[in-house]
Every structure is written in structure tokens, then in C-alpha cells.
């Protein structure tokens, strides 16, 4: 499921990672520059900087804090840079530990926590919002997303079903499709979603989100032609969506079409997730080896900087980097296991399986295959070309 889209919907109240307690890296010199935020040349970031300056003069003004936090979260998702989540948290600082805050602020707080992989804290906040405002579709949708990330599919489906009287049919069906497709009902969920998408119109952002879910489910079912149609249709609605670009890039890499990944992500190298896809694509192209070497070094430096800051948001990507670029199966498996303990999406399951196979670790294979068997994901394993032997 697409937590980025859902949580943006939630915090907008209109339509939608190291843990927060991680110890920060403290430089031993005042003049040490770890990295610069990329504000120069980016109008959205320049505007965020201006808004932060206004907030500094009125730090307890929620009407100013909410737009700052929302823009910072958007920057974190667009650029794949978790440091902006710290800015969002700082904007919400006066309300960060309060139990009784307006729902817009609490939804933003839940969004930051989810993005920082503090899923327990996110659920606590969303539980509070739902208890006080059971009719608030955004809170139900956000909670269904987090529950799906955690693999708690039955609970997620209950929240989706509660949306029936408060959201459009495409939102309800897409919300249901994500957890249903991961709990033994992929084909039915997919067919229901495709029928709903057959009706034209509606909000373009919601439709793009639903198409992306359809593409992901179709790929897991092994219907690659349908998956590509959905991804292409979604890109036509929003060619800038970083999550969608990552999902389609993975699809192209799986299909042995790395050259098609290059134009898709070549201008998104600020985003760590998309830079990794670019490096994975270049790795197998003889005429791109110089570029690959540079991008390999860049992503390694970024992951090292994240480690020194205490960030663990991109453990899944780090595991893929270790496994497929650094060829360090043991290191990749350690990261994949840490990641699996935090979140359980199909991509998390896949890297755990791949790293376990590469490392020859039967215990990790058994853990992964038990999840496959318990949740009816055999077609996903087959479509991804994974070996289920344990």
C-alpha cells in the first residue's frame, strides 16, 4: 500500500525514518558540515524556508505550524530525505507530547511518526482521532495504511469498511484492495478495483493512487501486461510521483528492462530511493559503468551519513544496496531482518527472502515462507521469481 499518498491525504484534511528516539550523531567539530539541505534552486524548499522563518516568530501559532509541517513532510517524501521529517516534528514541537490537540495536528503528528517508523506511536495518535471523530475518513484511511504496513490486515479492512458512508467508492475500494490483496484475496481485490477504475472522473490524485495499487497487485499476480498499463496510466496523471516512479522502476528491473529506468529516475537523484533504482539499472549496462561507479559511491556515502545521524528509515533500500551492489549477503540479511521487524510490506518480504537465500540462512527463510503460507502470497513469490525452498 502507498503510505505516502494516504498520509498526505490525511494531513491535508481535504482529500493525503530512524525512530524518533534514536540517538543523534553529534559532530566533534563546530565547522563540520555533514550535508546541506537542497534549498537552492528548489522553489518549494525556498518557500518552506521562508515559512519556517515566520514560524520562529510565532512558534505556538498552529495556523502557521500546520502548513510548515505539511510542507516539510511533502519535501521528505518527494526527496526521500528524512531530515525534513525532523523539521515537521520541530514545527509541531509545542503539541508533540500533548494528548488533546486538534485533529489536523494529530494527523500530521501520526504522519511524521509513521514516516519515522514509529508505527506504535502513529497508531496511538490515530486511535485518539478515530475515537473522538469516528466520522473522519482521513483518520480511518491513515490508520488502515499503517495497519497494512504492519501486516494487520483484518484490522485495516475494518477501517476501510467504515469509510463507506464517508468517502468515495474509489477510495473505499482502493483502501480495501491493499490489505485484501495481501491476505489471500488478491484476485478478487484486484477485479473489484479494476471495475471501480473503469468509471471515469474523480480526483486525479486519488485515481493515480488507485492505479498504482492496481499495478502493484497485478504484478504480484503475474499479470505483467496489466500491471504496466496501470503504472503508465498512473504516470500520465502524475509523472513526478516518487513512490510511483520507484514502483515502476522495480517492475522494469524485474522485467529485465534496466535501460527504461534511466529516463524515469535520472532527474531524481536527490531522492535516495530513486538514486538506488538508477544505480541498480546502470549496474547491468556496459555503457553506463562510469555513471554507475559515481552513483554507487554517492548512495554509499548517503547511507553512511544516515547511519551516523541514527536514521534507519531506508533499511530496506540499504539491504538491497548491500545485496545487489555490494554483494554482501550477510550484511544485507542483517538489515533485512531489522527492517522486517519494523514493517511487513511485500517489498520487505522480498528483500528478506532474497537476502536469506543469498546468505544460505534457513531460519530466515522459514520466517519469510511462514508469512507467505499464512497470508496466501504464493503467487507473489512465483511472480517475483523467488525460490521458496527452505
Image (cartoon, rainbow, N blue to C red):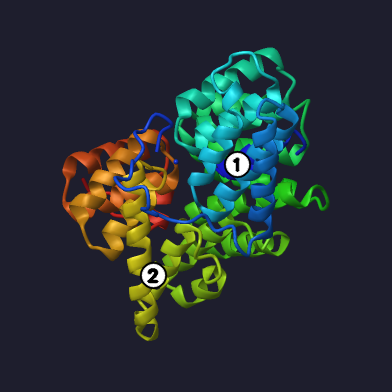
Q: What element carries label 1?
A: helix
Residue at 33% over, 56% down: 320
- Which of discs 2 and 1 lies nearer the camera? The answer is 2
- Residue positioned most to the right: 201
The relative height of residue 125 versus residue 296 in the rendered view (above or below) is above
Q: Is residue 211 visible?
A: yes
- Mark 2 or mark 1: which comes first in sequence? 1
Q: Is residue 11 visible?
A: no
Position of 63 with respect to 193 (left or right) is: right
Residue at 19% over, 39% down: 363
Residue 189: mark in rendering: 1
The residue closer to the viewer here, 54 or 315, is: 54
Local crowd size for mark 2, using a 10 Å CA cut-off: few (<14), some (14–19), many (≥20): many
Q: Mark 2 points at which residue?
A: 295
Q: In which quarter of the image is residue 278?
A: bottom left
Residue 308: mark in rendering: none
The relative height of residue 194 versus residue 238 in the rendered view (above or below) is above
Q: How many labels does the image show?
A: 2
Residue 311 placement (x, y as % from top left): 38, 42
Local crowd size for mark 1, using a 10 Å CA cut-off: few (<14), some (14–19), many (≥20): many
Residue 192 placement (x, y as % from top left): 67, 43
Residue at 50% over, 74% down: 262
Q: In which quarter of the image is residue 158?
A: top right
Quadrant the C terminus occupies: top left
Residue at 46% over, 61% down: 250
Amino acid at each position: 500500500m502507498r503510505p505516502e499518498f494516504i498520509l498526505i491525504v490525511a494531513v491535508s484534511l481535504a482529500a493525503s525514518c530512524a525512530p524518533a528516539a534514536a540517538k543523534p550523531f553529534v559532530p566533534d567539530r563546530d565547522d563540520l558540515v555533514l550535508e546541506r539541505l537542497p534549498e537552492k534552486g528548489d522553489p518549494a524548499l525556498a518557500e518552506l524556508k521562508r515559512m519556517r522563518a515566520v514560524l520562529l516568530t510565532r512558534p505556538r501559532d498552529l495556523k502557521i505550524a500546520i502548513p510548515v509541517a505539511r510542507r516539510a513532510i511533502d519535501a521528505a517524501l518527494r526527496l526521500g530525505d528524512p531530515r525534513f521529517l525532523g523539521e515537521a516534528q520541530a514545527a509541531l514541537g509545542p503539541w508533540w507530547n500533548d494528548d488533546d490537540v486538534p485533529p489536523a495536528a494529530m494527523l500530521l503528528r501520526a504522519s511524521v511518526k509513521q514516516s519515522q517508523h514509529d508505527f506504535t506511536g502513529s497508531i496511538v495518535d490515530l486511535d485518539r482521532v478515530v475515537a473522538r471523530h469516528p466520522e473522519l475518513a482521513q483518520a480511518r484511511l491513515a490508520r488502515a495504511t499503517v495497519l497494512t504496513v504492519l501486516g494487520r490486515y483484518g484490522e485495516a479492512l475494518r477501517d476501510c469498511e467504515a469509510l463507506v458512508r464517508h468517502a468515495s467508492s474509489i477510495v473505499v475500494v482502493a483502501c480495501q484492495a491493499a490489505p485484501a490483496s495481501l491476505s489471500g484475496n488478491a484476485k478478487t481485490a484486484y477485479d473489484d478495483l479494476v471495475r471501480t477504475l473503469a468509471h471515469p472522473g474523480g480526483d486525479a490524485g486519488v485515481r493515480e493512487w488507485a492505479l498504482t495499487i492496481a499495478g502493484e497487485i497485478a504484478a504480484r499476480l503475474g499479470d505483467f501486461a496489466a500491471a504496466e498499463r496501470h503504472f503508465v496510466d498512473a504516470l500520465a496523471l502524475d509523472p513526478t510521483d516518487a513512490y510511483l516512479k520507484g514502483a515502476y522502476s522495480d517492475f522494469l528491473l524485474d522485467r529485465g528492462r534496466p535501460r527504461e529506468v534511466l529516463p524515469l529516475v535520472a532527474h531524481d537523484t536527490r531522492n535516495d530511493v530513486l538514486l538506488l533504482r538508477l544505480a541498480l539499472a546502470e549496474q547491468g549496462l556496459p555503457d553506463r559503468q562510469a555513471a554507475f561507479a559515481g552513483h554507487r559511491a554517492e548512495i554509499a556515502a548517503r547511507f553512511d551519513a544516515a547511519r551516523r545521524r541514527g536514521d534507519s528509515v531506508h533499511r530496506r533500500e540499504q539491504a538491497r544496496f548491500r545485496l545487489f551492489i555490494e554483494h554482501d549477503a550477510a550484511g544485507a540479511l542483517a538489515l533485512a531482518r531489522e527492517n522486517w521487524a519494523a514493517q511487513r510490506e511485500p517489498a520487505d518480504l522480498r528483500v528478506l527472502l532474497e537476502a536469506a537465500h543469498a546468505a544460505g540462512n534457513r531460519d530466515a527463510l522459514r520466517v519469510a515462507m511462514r508469512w507467505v503460507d499464512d497470508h496466501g502470497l504464493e503467487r507473489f513469490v512465483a511472480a517475483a521469481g523467488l525460490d521458496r525452498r527452505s
